[in-house]
Amino acid sequence: MTDDPSMRVEPAVPADPPVLSGPRPRSPRRLLLGRLLRRPTALCAMAILALVVLAAAFAQTLAPYAPSRMDIAHRLAAPDARHLLGSDDFGRDVLSRLLFGARLSLAVGALVVMLATALGLAIGITAGFVRRLDAALMRFTDALMAFPDILLAIALVAGLGPSLFDVVLALGIVYTPRVARIVRGATLVLRELPFIEAARSMGASTPRIMATHLLPNLTSALIVQGTFIFGYAILTEAALSFLGTGVPPTTPTWGNMMAGAQAYMGRADWLIFVPGAAIVLTVLSLQILGDGLRDALDPKLQRLM
């Protein structure tokens, strides 16, 4: 053995394992937004809805006149520089009433969605998870769904009264069975999955399982159904107002504007065309957005998008 330091062999030091670098996983919200943005129809629907919401939010600033301001000298005036969308039979500016009507029409839709979702979620998750209550709750929803939406809404509003609160309450009851049916079906599937059995074995109570384990897995279905109910609520409110059983005529909504214009269809077509176009664009955009959300949230279609 030599003592020459130059001849010594140092033990090999293992090299550090290579660090694999790559893009960070995207959050579920960004993934959902990315899937929606890849759909031109959904993107157009989101843009239209954004414009409608902004117009309703800033109606006080954008409206050239107060919605109840009358100008009898210019009643039934065609669209011109003074009234960009014309005036109605009382000389009220159609554009101003359209902007303020958007507030109430969107408010009715949003309140109906919240009420129907809350009631439908409570009924559906209870019926799907508590077997002994399933039959009674589902027969109740079947009884409500046996009537056409508009007929049931007219009957409820006739019994409650033609006020904004009563219209929201009636429409919330009408669309509760839609949410309850979807939530019950999803709950029946989720309750048999292993994570629910694990929660039961650990001693979790039924309310805790519903709130902690079931509710987060129902969010996607509730969001999609909410967009459809929003559009249905705007349409049904317009139909009720058109028939004279909805919000009082003194309150500007798109439905009331169409109801007041039916006597002047041949003389002042813009009175019914303007609110009708607003209803069509808003409801169609909500339906397209709902379809896009359904496809984006469907796990079976995630690889194809």
Image: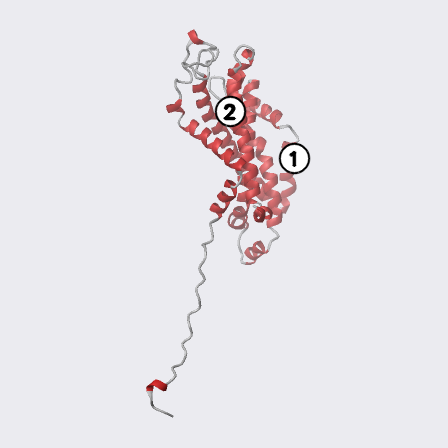
Horizontal and vertical percent for residue 220?
54, 43
The three-letter amino acid code for the residue at tag 1 is Asp
Residue found at x 39% / y 23%: 62
Q: Which residue is mark 1?
A: 142
Front-lying residue, 53 or 242 = 53
Horizontal and vertical percent for residue 219?
53, 44
Residue found at x 42% / y 30%: 54
Q: Would you say residue 230 is visible in this rendering? A: no
Q: Which residue is mark 2?
A: 278
Q: Determine whether 200 is above or below 138 in the image.
A: below
Horizontal and vertical percent for residue 206?
55, 50
The three-letter amino acid code for the residue at tag 2 is Ala
Q: Is residue 42 left or right of residue 72?
A: right
Upstream in the sequence, badge 1 or badge 2?
A: 1
User: How many tags in the picture?
Assistant: 2
Give the CA distance from mark 1 to mark 2. 33 Å
Quadrant in the picture for the C terminus: top right
